[in-house]
Image: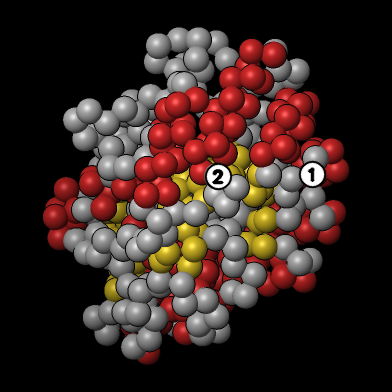
Amino acid sequence: MKITSVDCIRIQGGDPCQGRNTWNPIVIRINTDEGISGYGEAGVAYGKGHRAAFGMIQDFATVILGEDPRNIEKIWDKIYRKTFWGLGGGTIISAGMSAIDIALWDIKGKALGVPVYQLLGGQTNRKLRAYASQIQFGWGTPDVPGEKSLMITPEDYANAAKKAMAEGYTAVKVDPLALSDREPDGRGPWKTTGLLDNHTLETAVDRVAAIREAGGPDLDIIIELHSYTDVLSSIQLGRRLEQYNIFYYEEPCSPLNPGNMLEVHRSLNIPIASGERIYGRTGFREFLEQHSLQVVQPDICLCGGLSEAKKISDMASAYDCAVQIHVCGSPISKAAALHIETAIPNFLIHEHHRWALHPALRETCVYDYQPVDGFYEAPDLPGIGQELNQETLERAEIITIR
């Protein structure tokens, strides 16, 4: 089997966050001489970077033409060592490598007629507990008339938690500092670094307190700070939040300085999580050796693909560290995450992002996998069990490398 062409695909995804972000998933389809194609994704659909990733997969595609797609480790190492910048790593390099790697696993599973999790060691976890992610934007299908998406008051946060619990979720994630209460659109002056003023702290704490009261003692609450806070402000806030029995504390400071993350960990009685912007085994190594993270969150579409995510998860296991795959992409990224979560013994919980509820995202692919009563199961179809549908392909920008 040989790789004959690579389709580099930019999806016109719209704006699921109501004016706060654009959404342009970057997808790759690797085609072979035996008629089997595999799908992967570069994990920069949100924020700024999708154009760079679109170019990156085109450049890397030229490196893999003619290769046997079943030789996944060989191809990964070739991109890593023979493209010069592969050894440099970083967001866009790792995103391009991830997209290719996922697509290769998809091809191999299809060629063998088995789901990818069987190739990763088999099924360790059949049912995957999920949490409702980013409820500061509300919960439920967006863009429904009458649906309130701007979350300001504690009551708003309590109501979002109740909606998630009504669907069977037993855990939610919230960024209590994401939206300011000082401007009507939530974007007003809102300092989140250094020492926070009492009003900012009390606003965030009141929102979390409302979620705890609405959810009761059994609801697990994850605090997400997106690294918008730093060492000082995250410790300051974390000490006030300890009383609410926080499940874990995500990205309290920049992941570029592991020592800073360690200082946060030593200052709080809350497990610390990070990984969305940490790439590869080498990126996670120092965090694990210092025990500054108790939950690692590799994004399969950013960390180096399924191959690297499995190695990161195994490294984490050696340090008694749990794994929550970061998922914030198209349904292709979700499907890939479900496979590795099924296989690894240190799986903790699956991230079900609010954006994944948006019809424009759910309709991009052939299958619409959604949790049932707060739990997922991995697809049992050969490969990753997901691909773009014809309508999406017809609307997308596609550049084919031959």
- Amino acid carrying label 2: it is Gly
Query: Residue drawn at (49%, 38%), measured in percent from left and top?
Result: 214
| Residue 83 higher or lower than 377, as above or below | above
Tell me the quarter of the image containing the C terminus. bottom left
Is residue 125 shown left or right of residue 388? right
Task: Classify mark 2: helix, strand or loop.
Answer: loop
Q: Residues within 10 Å of mark 2 (few under 14, many from 20)?
A: few
**Which residue is disc 1 drawn over?**
269
Viewer-closest of 48 and 343: 343
Query: Residue drawn at (53%, 31%), measured in percent from left and top?
Result: 210
Query: Residue drawn at (63%, 27%), measured in percent from left and top?
Result: 205
Is residue 154 shown left or right of residue 314? left
The structure's colour scheme is: secondary structure
| Residue 130 higher or lower than 268, as above or below | below
Q: Which of disc 2 and disc 1 is earlier in sequence?
A: 2
Q: Position of residue 99 (x, y in %)?
A: 44, 60
**Which residue is disc 2 drawn over?**
216
